[in-house]
Amino acid sequence: MNDTAFQLENVNFSYLGKYPALRNIDITIKQGQKISVIGANGSGKSTLLQMLDGLIFPDTGAIKAFGRELKESDFNDESFCRDFRKRVGLVFQNPDVQLFCPTVKEDIIFGPLQLGCGKREIEKRLEVILSILEIKDLLDRPPHQLSVGEKRKVAIASVLMIEPDVLILDEPTAGLDPLTTRHIMDLLIQANESGKTIITSTHDLHIVEEISDIVYVFGQQKCIVKAGEPDIILKDTALLEAHNLLHIHTHRHKDKIHIHPHLHLEHHLEE
């Protein structure tokens, strides 16, 4: 049995054939792994996630999903497309891209309805997810009236409803308060413990250690500059500074302002 979720071999991609977005990407992701992709804006993280979700395809090189090479023409096959969409779910960085129905409930159940899931099964899944994410009171509201955190929860709920084997998240904690971040983190950890593959793009180095078995660092040249276990990557301050992943910390000492990189790895939340 093939235990590989995705394998990318020398993948290159450019927008409109002239704006490089990914260069010479080699990645193997095992089923059940937790993978994080970190890097500055414009380094190719979102492009990679969209490729893993079968939304774009390599100019050169190859991408395999569950042991089969993934090609754009495959998605003309209704059976293949349906199976892939059941197995892989992407939560976009901007939840407004993902939420388009008149009400929250309609957005959440849209995916499984399109994939042929029965109404009884949908109601069962909905009850569980509403409880986990604590969003039952949002069901009848229009998505555009929600806060950023509420929208992100609804977007995650809409993907979880499909019960995918692979959960891909683009900046899932961006703009969220600490409590909501903690809630989403716990959800991802639980999903992984149940066997799901979790692939996360993030700028938030606080969360990387918890949600990563392997971390891939992308540079401005749209390529992987380093990969490794999270403790090794997070201790490499020279690497993080070189790729714009450190906060700049300013303080005053004896009437002089000091500016230096500062990596906040301890993220304490009130119980």
Image: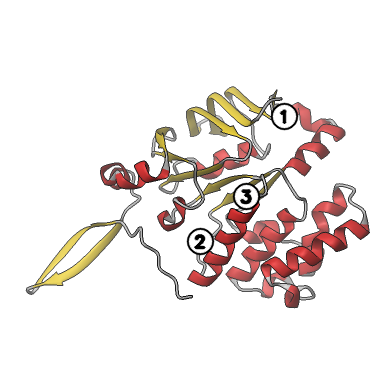
Give the camera-side residue of 267 and 238.
Answer: 267
For disc 2, the neighbor class at 10 Å (few under 14, some 14 to 19, many from 20) is some
Give the camera-side residue of 245 and 164.
Answer: 164
- Tag 1's secondary structure? helix
Residue 158 in picture, x, y percent from top left = 73, 58
Would you say the residues marked 2 and 3 are in contact, meaning their CB atoms lie under 8 Å apart? no
> Residue at (39%, 38%) from the top-left corner?
219
Q: Is residue 15 above or below residue 187?
A: above
Residue position for label 3: 193
As drawn, the residue found furthest toward the bottom would be 137
Kind of residue sitting beneath label 1: Glu
Question: Could you say which quadrant of the image residue 3 lies in?
Answer: top right
Kind of residue sitting beneath label 2: Ala
Residue 87 in picture, x, y percent from top left = 74, 41
For disc 3, the neighbor class at 10 Å (few under 14, some 14 to 19, many from 20) is few
Kind of residue sitting beneath label 3: Glu
Q: Is residue 245 left or right of residue 161?
A: left
Q: CA gap, disc 2 to disc 1?
A: 30 Å
Residue position for label 1: 72
**Badge 1 or badge 3: first in the primary sequence:** 1
For disc 1, the neighbor class at 10 Å (few under 14, some 14 to 19, many from 20) is few
Q: Is residue 188 left or right of residue 109?
A: left
Residue 79 in picture, x, y percent from top left = 86, 34
Q: Is residue 240 above or below residue 151?
A: above
Q: CA gap, disc 2 to disc 3?
A: 23 Å
Question: Could you say which quadrant of the image residue 160 lies in?
Answer: bottom right
Q: Which mark is residue 174?
A: 2
- Quarter holding the N terminus? top right
